[in-house]
Image (spheres, rainbow, N blue to C red):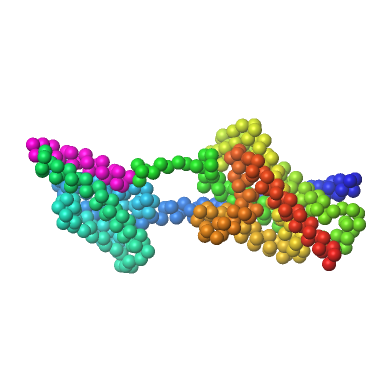
Amino acid sequence: MKKKLTLLALQIKSAFISIPKIILGTMVIGFFVVLLSAGIGMASSRDNDERMKVAVVYPEHNEREENSEFKYIKMALNYVSEIDTVSNVCTFEYTSRDEAIRGLRDERYVMAVLVPEKLISGIMSGENTPIEVVYSSEGVNNTSMIFREMLSAGGSDLATAQSGIYTFDDLFYGILRGYKSQMKSHEDKLNEIYLSYALNRSIYFETRDISVKDGLSTVQFYVCTGIVMLLILSGITCAANLKGESRAMNMSIKSQGIHAYEWGICKTTGLALIYSGIFLVLFIFANAFRARVPALSNVLTVSSFAEMAGSFLGILVLVYAVFSFIYCIFTIVKNPVYSVLTLFILGMLFMYSSGCFVSSSLLPSGIRSVGAYLPTAGFFRLAGQIIKGTVGAAGILINVLWIFIFQAIAALAMRIRRNA
């Protein structure tokens, strides 16, 4: 036992001697991880802003005519433009016909929608005067197909909404002839009700933000991605500390009565303590200043001493699990260069499959099924629980299990190398 404790102390001392190199390497790797995360965030925001710009040309109308059908046309198009599924894809600009054509030529607009003068009356009479859609000179493309499907869906919604108006008009013409003077105001009200129900999806679907308790916000998602990536890539900095031992060294360790599993625990513990200390200090400072820095308050949601203690435990287990994973790879792949390449390739591949770069729901079903059982899935889930203060027994146990598995595989590789 004394030999084993001495070995553990020596490994911890060796890790502490490497602190300057570890801190410098962590800063460099962290810088690149932050740049990568910022790039992903900027790309995401740019994608959100790149919506189709559509010109809408209203028919000529008289503003003084309150009962003109222009207001019905405007009401219908306003409802359409406010639908989430439409507003996330398109932006509408109301302009003249000449300006719309010039915009198509200048590629400011993807397409122009020319609304006919008798649109509403045509719908009411069954004439169904079509809306003219003018595309740019590039012709029909994927964007055009998307917009066509949107128009088709909108036409179905409008037809459903107007079926109630037809019935209402028949009722006035047949039974309520004495109240025909009130028909127009009632039509306006019914149009508003029907169109709001046909076009406003929020009436039928309840939106619940699961990021507060059950999930991660977009910012928290990429913070967790950065944490896991930083820990995995830290293996590059610690390659000298975790590299596999030679056969002669393995035989010497065995002759001293030190089990291969115990050797792995000793080598991993020193580095895990240093990185846990670094992350604990960062975590404490981030919590201390999050009230003054809004960006931190959007990431960390730890609110009580118990949650803080759980996050501390989560950091220790997460760091130990990741470094056990790194040590396992470095033990199996003896060559330092190949072991670093293997760590990088496997780490990024595992992270992608586990839904660390994009949500698992966006991945193919086969990759999603496999990714759920990869170690990076447990790392990522525990990282999310740490920053939210929701560390649970399941997250801890899964990562502890991975620690035992990686240490056991590394010990087996050492035994095989001893007997080779």
Nearest the eye: 55 or 90? 90
Q: In this view, does 215 lie to the left or right of 271?
A: left
Above or below — where is 118 with respect to 288? below
The residue sitting at the top extreme is 305
Residue at 65% x, 41% y is 393
Residue 47 highlighted magenta (yes or no): no
Residue 87 horizontal/vertical position (percent): 36, 50
Task: Evaluate whether residue 278 shows in this view.
Answer: no
Residue sitting at 30 percent across and 49 percent down? Answer: 80
| Front-lying residue, 14 or 24 | 14
Residue furthest out toward the left: 178
Quarter that holds the C terminus: bottom right
Residue sitting at x 72%, y 59%: 329
Percent coordinates x, y for residue 412 in the rendering:
78, 59
Residue situated in front as seen by the camera: 7 or 161: 161
Compared across the picture, whether 420 is left or right of 332 comes to: right
Give the magenta-colored segment's residue range.
177-200
From the top left corner, tell me how far across and down residue 220 is, in percent. 55, 45
- Pick whichever, 347 or 182, lies toward us: 182
Instruction: State the image coordinates of residue 178 (x, y, percent, origin top left).
Output: 8, 36
